[in-house]
Image (spheres, rainbow, N blue to C red):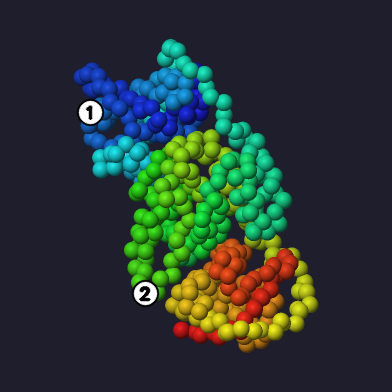
Amino acid sequence: MRIKIDAIRGCLEGVVPGNIATCAADGTPNVAYLSQVQYVDGEHVALSYQFFNTTRRNILAHPYARVAVFDPHTVAHYRLSLQYLRTEESGPLFENMKARLAGIASHTGMSGVFRLLGSDIYRVLDIEQVPGETLPAPPPRRNLLAALRACAESLCASADLDGLLARLLDGLAQHFDIEHAMVLMLDEAGGRLYTVASRGYVSSGVGSEIALGAGVIGVAARERTPIRIGHFTAEYGYGRAIRDSLERNGVTGIETEIPLPGLAESCSQLAVPIMGCQRLIGMLYVESPHDLRFGYDDEDALVTLAGQLGAAIRLVQQAPDVAEEPAAAEPPPAPLAGQAVRVRHYGENDSVFLDGDYLIKGVAGSIFWALVRDYAEKGQTSFSNRELRLDARIRLPDLSDNLEARLILLARRLVERGAPVRIEKTGRGRFRLIVERPLTLIDS
């Protein structure tokens, strides 16, 4: 090919609708508009299959097509010569195109009409630029390769998970100009993701959860693929994701859901899996109130950054048990004053309430309950990650326990709630429980 498909990915964003020309078996031509042309790799694209119409019949009878696409900035016009290979009706590519189509449909008022039936995979045989006047290309918003390098170097300087997350969010804001972002970790046993860090929101949402397959974050996690949406879509919004998650899990009784952080009307979304040794660790999610904020190049950069983050998380997860620092002398406990705090624990889901207000649940809840029990029964305030991993009361999952992430989650929830109990790190693999008021433990 004289022109490579990688070089014109900006034409595939759907800002200017493309069209497809096909030919029937008897030679009758047909031209129709296209909803989506999706970049697959350097030799393939995918087209949205939405209707069994003339175009579909023609392709099945004669598997060749010409597709016209346009650069939204320069109005350069390109013609792609394609050969139809197959249709995918499930999997990462299908879910990616389905999510993007939902955004296009919501943006154009066609939500009731646009429905993806399949992703048609085509081999790109040739690309030619149609002669004509073009506009000068606008300067790039920023150098993404330089931004990626700066963020990667910053991550290398982190020695623990808390530092990794802080440097990641700082780097996204400083180098990528991304102000709204969150990191979620995978609870593999529970089939859900929980928020451990966020930036740019009124409420941090630390501890909020979303089920695999719910919303753009959950779908991207389930399929282990990045998903990028350029327009607002109610179908993949937060409210819908939370509602679907609650209905699927049959949540009733005491309300223990922490709202996800997020923009009320997110016009651009990009959800990127954080992978480590081919296992899903969590999700990096960024969003913007502006349409088409993230392009293919942004996606490439953040996928690469998430890959380095995943490798770094794997390293810090394995480090504490190997190189824990020795325990420091435990200071004498400060005298406690004030009214006792009622700490109520529900064994069914390990949810914990402080004076009737919800704090946390799940593994983080069982960790907190074990800590306050040891404090109340033995006066213990100094703990190590190693002893928590060996504590049968906590019931950590065998694989990918994410203990450090759960401790970060618990520590931040205690600070956000202004609780009279805090967790303070005292060294590698060690922390201290700080209690400011008497505790009354109630195990329900």
Q: Is residue 160 left or right of residue 287?
A: right
- Along the line of sight, which residue is nearer the eye, 238 or 120? 238
The residue at the point 53 percent across, 48 percent down is 180
Q: Which residue is mark 2?
A: 253
Q: Is residue 59 left or right of residue 41?
A: left
Q: How many marks?
A: 2
Q: Position of residue 382 (x, y in %)?
A: 70, 76
Gap in Å between the C-alphas at discs 1 and 2? 53 Å
The residue at the point 43 percent across, 57 percent down is 212
Q: Is residue 401 left or right of residue 225?
A: right
Q: Which residue is mark 1?
A: 54
In the figure, 14 relative to 444: above or below? above
Kind of residue at badge 2: Gly
In the figure, 220 relative to 411: above or below? above
Kind of residue at badge 1: Thr
Q: Are marks 1 and 2 in contact (CB under 8 Å)?
A: no
- Give residue 174's quadrant in the image: top right
Judged by depth in the image, the label closer to the viewer, 1 or 2, is 2
- Is label 1 in a helix, a strand or a loop? helix
The residue at the point 39 percent across, 51 percent down is 237
Name the disc covering residue 210, or none.
none
Q: Is residue 87 visible?
A: no
- Give residue 87's quadrant in the image: top left
